[in-house]
Amino acid sequence: MGNGIILSNHYRCTPPIIQFCSPNYPGGLQILSDFDQTATVKHLLAYHVEGSHLNHTNPEEIDAVETAIASLLKHGYSTNSDDNSKTIGVMSPFSQQANALKYRLSNRWRNFSWDDIGTVHTFQGGEKAAIIFSPYQCHQEHSFWFLNRKPNLLNTAVSRARELFILVGNLRELELAGGETKRLVEHIRLHGEINLQSAIFDRP
């Protein structure tokens, strides 16, 4: 109701992550989070997955997300941490993809809370050390309108990650769709790392 209050100071995400969201803030965003400028670890990663649609899910993206989590666990991240310092969150804009991810991941890692896997909307107000984003849409003939109609959806998705955001999807089609999905891929290319040789996950 009325005019909302826009908070201009940001303390949660590392600058390379939250800089994606900054253009959406009138007057800019004051990024006050800690950040080691000399660190060689990338805070933004994107992995290309051609993908396909089966029963309103993208099985190849689900496979790639599972591979990404296995890699993150080897590098100190956790599917269940009391202090939330190194926990992993997984999200998709679409509920059926999110539900398929819940089923697959919670069956492999029994301690992976269902609360840490869901749609972008279920993560509003939350945060994780690492966020893996599965956009689901991967074919030119499918509309990317839902992802691009407003900046809010990707703004929320990216800003849930404190230190690592991973995009797993068809990067070519996300760029060709224009709008926010194109801007996200370009932002990761500029400030992070892109792997176009399908999903090969390795963290330094």
Image (cartoon, helix red, strand yellow):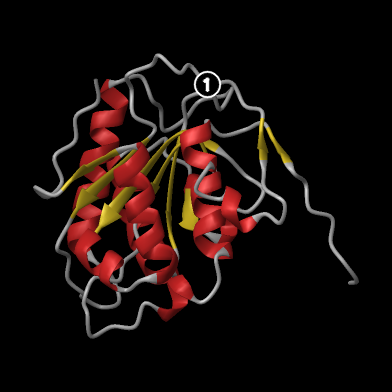
The crowd level at tag 1 (other Cα within 10 Å; few <14, some 14-19, many 20+) is few
Residue at (20, 64) in percent of width and height: 172
Q: Residue 91: where, in percent of width, then height?
A: 43, 54
Q: Is residue 129 visible?
A: no
Q: Nearer the viewer, residue 59 or 165?
A: 165
Residue at (19, 29) in percent of width and height: 202
- Residue sitting at the far right: 2
Q: Residue 185: where, in percent of width, then height?
A: 33, 54
Quarter of the figure with residue 32? top right
Q: Residue 171: where, in percent of width, then height?
A: 24, 59
Q: Is residue 134 visible?
A: yes
Q: Nearer the viewer, residue 123 or 178?
A: 178
Quarter of the figure with residue 1? bottom right
Screen quadrant of the C terminus: top left
Q: Nearer the viewer, residue 75 or 106?
A: 75
Task: Describe the element under mark 1 as helix, strand or loop.
Answer: loop
Q: Which residue is mark 1?
A: 35
Q: Amino acid at mark 1?
A: Phe
Quarter of the figure with residue 174? bottom left
In this picture, residue 29 sits left or right of residue 105: right
Looking at the picture, does residue 50 appear above or below residue 35? below
In this picture, residue 122 sits left or right of residue 20: right
Looking at the picture, does residue 95 appear above or below residue 201? below
